[in-house]
Image: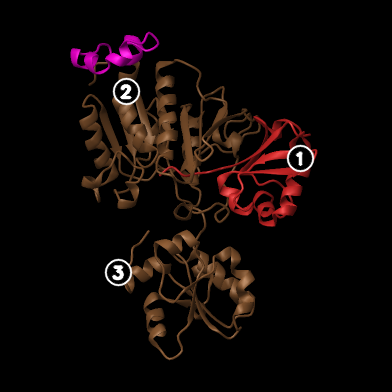
Amino acid sequence: MINTTTLSNDEIRRYSRHLIMPEVGLAGQLALKGASVLMIGAGGLGSPLALYLAAAGVGHLGIVDFDVVDESNLQRQIIHGTSTLGVPKLESARQRIRDLNPFVEVTGYNTGLSSQNALEIMRDYDVVIDGTDNFPTRYLVNDACVLLGKPNVYGSIFRFEGQASVFGVKEGPCYRCLYPEPPPPGLVPSCAEGGVLGVLPGIIGTIQATEAIKLIMGIGSSLVGRLMLFDALEMRFRELKLRKNPNCPVCGTNPTVTELIDYQAFCGIVPEQASLPMENRTTPVELAEALRGDRPPQVIDVREPHEWDIVHLDGARLIPLATLPAHLHEYDRSAHIVVHCKSGARSAKATQLLKDAGFRDVKNLEGGILRWARDVDPSLPTY
Amino acid sequence: MPVKVIIPTALRQYTGGQGTVSVQGGTVAEVLQQLSAEHQEFGKQIFDDTGKLRSFVNIYRNDDDVRYLEGLNTPISERDELSIIPAIAGGA
């Protein structure tokens, strides 16, 4: 059991830069030591969050994550490292936190958050921090926080842009006051297509950490009722007013959401290959064979120019999806065409577009250039 | 009179990459309709098939959500800034 009524001499030395500020002092530091914070996700936002909360001396950190460390994480997920590639993120984070501050107790939940386990996991924590990467979990975290009456320190990022706020406190608005329902799949860009500036989660995650620490110590003005917006390209912070919506489906006066909902898991655009008939699909192995044959197909790459620069197929022609309609007149309707993109979703749209325009022999490369690199030419880089 | 509209990253691909655009209109609806006329795909992203604003897109006049003003009929002048704030979910 952690003694939350006193600090040891070691702890006093460690936290001296906190203790000498009257706004924090011994009382504030003991509040941190006695606090428990649950972080949903140990990724981009979770990395700076966990590091700063641990360094600050939050006594108990809970982390929910079921992922393992991948090379593509390290551009931004600074709690992990090259030495923990392939290691579960929970374990990787735990090692780093132990090194940073052995006074912090870490509880890991190696699972996805669902309507079945959310309330149980969140019940014992003082503050919940939302660092997830998908809408279903964000709505789950919001609703559970409202039902349990716990503050939900929210942060979200996309490319160069971030949002932060504090939801879930009784007098303030919740995420559903802002956006009553999640967007349907297909209307938001997919995570892989979206990309993110590596330093961006550092900025938004540290704003979340700041808010959590202020809530625990009971100091300052929190982001309750305010939405902080950050644009890294313009280097501009803006602030919007948020209001508690009396008609909010979960925190309003007559709530319609009274239990947790598992929304369909999606990460933006759902793969559309499944809807194409077999005659309009081909695999990388089949394409490689066809390219060696007497009647090789014309290959159209519908990705963007910056993706082409990373890796492309020899002999392919770059026509980004948005510009494809303007190029249709250059092809014969009976031409043998194969379209591809990164993993097959955009090229499925292109295939449909070509079919609708009267092309009779058009195929989508299933799995895109990533699967080509896996099955045909492993020397190609993947991204 | 022209109104400054701030376009979020997620929708910039529909405004030719522009982060801010200048659009004519005296109400929020007029500004958004003009913007949709100039950039058709943009309109499809923020309005549904019935012409209603999508539930995951919020519109702010300066720092106020127009839902708590006069909705799409909220008047807007050249001194105001209109922000389109869609839900984003990234975090990893």
Can you tell which chain is drawn red?
Answer: B
In this view, the residue in front, A20 or A226, is: A20
Q: Which residue is mark 1?
A: B2
Callout 3: few (<14), some (14-19), or many (20+) C-alpha neighbours within 10 Å? few
Label 3 vs label 2: CA separation? Answer: 45 Å
Which residue: 44% across, 71% down? A366
- Residue density around tag 1, few if under 14, some if 14–19, many if 20 or more, within 10 Å: some
* Chain whose colour in the figure is brown: A
Q: Vertical placement of A146 versus A297: above or below?
A: above
* Depicted A5 relative to depicted B83: above or below: above
Whether callout 3 and callout 2 share a subunit is answered yes
State the residue at coordinates (37%, 27%). Answer: A125
The residue lying at 52 percent from left, 25 percent from top is A223
Residues drawn in magenta: A5-29
Q: Position of residue A230 (x, y in %)?
A: 52, 35
Which image quarter holds the C terminus of chain A?
bottom left
**Residue behind mark 2:** A56
In the rendered image, which residue does mark 3 sit on? A378
Residue A215, image x and y in percent? 44, 21
Of residues A200 and A285, which is closer to you in this image? A200
